[in-house]
Amino acid sequence: MSQPGESLRDRKKRRTRAALERATVRLAAERGYDHVTVEEIAAEADVSVRTFFNYFASKDEALIGADPEAGPRMAARVLAAPAGVTPFQAYRDSVLAEITDELNNARDLWLLRKDVLMQRPDLLVRAFATSAEHEQLLASAVAQRAGLPESHLYPRLLVAAGSAAFRCAVTRWALDDSVALGDVVGDALDLFGTGLAHVPQHHEGGTS
Amino acid sequence: MSQPGESLRDRKKRRTRAALERATVRLAAERGYDHVTVEEIAAEADVSVRTFFNYFASKDEALIGADPEAGPRMAARVLAAPAGVTPFQAYRDSVLAEITDELNNARDLWLLRKDVLMQRPDLLVRAFATSAEHEQLLASAVAQRAGLPESHLYPRLLVAAGSAAFRCAVTRWALDDSVALGDVVGDALDLFGTGLAHVPQHHEGGTS
DNA sequence: TGCAAAGTTGCAGTCACTGCAAAACCATCC
DNA sequence: GGATGGTTTTGCAGTGACTGCAACTTTGCA
């Protein structure tokens, strides 16, 4: 988990960031998102309030704790995909890779977040708003890959579909987590891939 | 514009609401969203700050000014569509109907909003977060229409696609408003309908 | 005209978030 | 080991969004 060329300083930063994220999620799950103040979160993470805001631009952001590198990383993956792969496939793969990583590193946090998001589904949407610039970045990568101008609808739409897929998958998963979150996201992206024009078959006990 | 059975009270309410919305958009477009305080908006609309918050739950909400009836209205339209129509078609039609109405009533406001949203694209996302419960309502309607259980992914995904389509269409339209916003939303929904798996043809000067 | 319901307002308070400047801290080089 | 310089942490003071409450005003209706 600790990188090779990482200085003490870097390690400390990573640890406080993680502590703040963890404190936010834990407290919010425990007593409800808006019955927790930033002051309490900071205290729990043993750090000043001002420091909290050095790490996260808002309380919302700390709850989701999205890795700031995730956007660029996905964009890079989209561009690095082998030549024969369609833009859709490349994007789909990079989303799923990111999510699998995330769940492997912090499955326990997501289980807590689930409780919070069930009470306040709007928080997930708002958290995504924060990363509006990252959407732009990703859309550019898709556009480049697809050979379309930046102004074209398709890249933006594909990226937005990714967000939507994730969002819907989480709420679906929150209702019944007998399926892996990653699989639900995959299903959702597939639906977007093949089109929503007709209603998918519904098997008892199945997901799509 | 004024309803038949509308009392003086109701008319006044509609007028203050409209005034607040208008003031918010006008001032935000003029000098930037976060250089405008709620106090100034209230003053512009000739009303107290407290009253502002009786009408809108947040400054964000006032900027978009989504009609609180819109969600229920669309849900009703989805359920009322003729029997032969697919859920997708029914939903698509109800979204487009709503948007056409909105643009007919307040095209000028949308032109101003465009300027604000170009500076701060996150605001549109956040505004949609407010209407998370309405999404739920719409999703139920779609589920019912499609004969799927509430827990199924499809209805949620279709509704989320609607939001995404609108969001992307606005940003696309903000770049170049030589096409009607309604048409762009239509194009976006069609892309979702037929599927994103393959890249659409790109005609010079065309949209999709 | 008078009463009840609905809408408006001011006020006091909480809390998220920001800029700034001092203090504590870590890395580096002598 | 100690001086030096860049980074991070912190306190503090301030702004502004938002809420609950208790008067007060306006509208609907008998």
Image (tube, coloured by chain):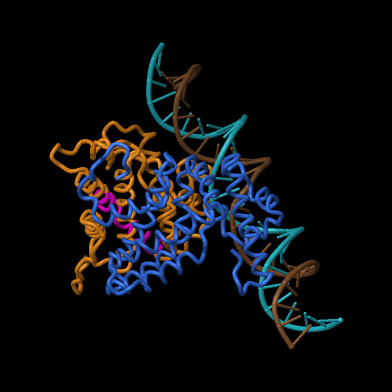
Chain colours: A orange, B blue, C cyan, D brown
Q: For the point 21% across and 43% down, which residue is it?
A: A87
The residues colored magenta run A99-117
**Left or right, B153 with reference to C25:** left
- Quadrant for residue A144, please give it: top left
Q: Main secondary structure of the magenta part?
A: helix
Q: Is B195 part of what is drawn in magenta?
A: no
Residue A168 image point, x, y percent: 32, 60
User: x and y percent of residue B56 in the render?
Assistant: 58, 59
Asked whether, in this view, residue A139 is left or right of residue A21, the answer is left
Q: Is residue A25 at all visible to an observer of this figure?
A: yes
Residue B83's image quarter?
A: bottom left
Q: In which quarter of the image is the C terminus of chain B?
A: top left
Does B126 appear above or below A11? below
Quarter of the figure with the N terminus of chain B: bottom right
Number of numbered discs visible in the structure rendering: 0
Position of residue B71 measured from the top left corner of the image (x, y, whole percent): 45, 65
D7 in relation to A40, above or below: above
Give the camera-side residue of A195 and B104.
B104
In the foreground, A50 or B21:
B21
Would you place residue C25 above or below residue C4 in this image? above
B206 vs A5: above or below:
below
Front residue of this view, candidates A109 and B114: B114
Residue A139 appears in view? no
- Res A175 quadrant in image: bottom left
**From the viewer's perspective, is B154 left or right of B48?**
left
Q: Residue at position x 51%, y 49% from top?
A: B110
Which residue lies at the image location 36% right of the left edge and 34% below the top edge?
A8
Give residue B62's position: percent from left, percent from top.
57, 55
Residue plotted at (64% across, 61% down): B15
Q: Who is closer to the viewer here, B77 or A182? A: B77
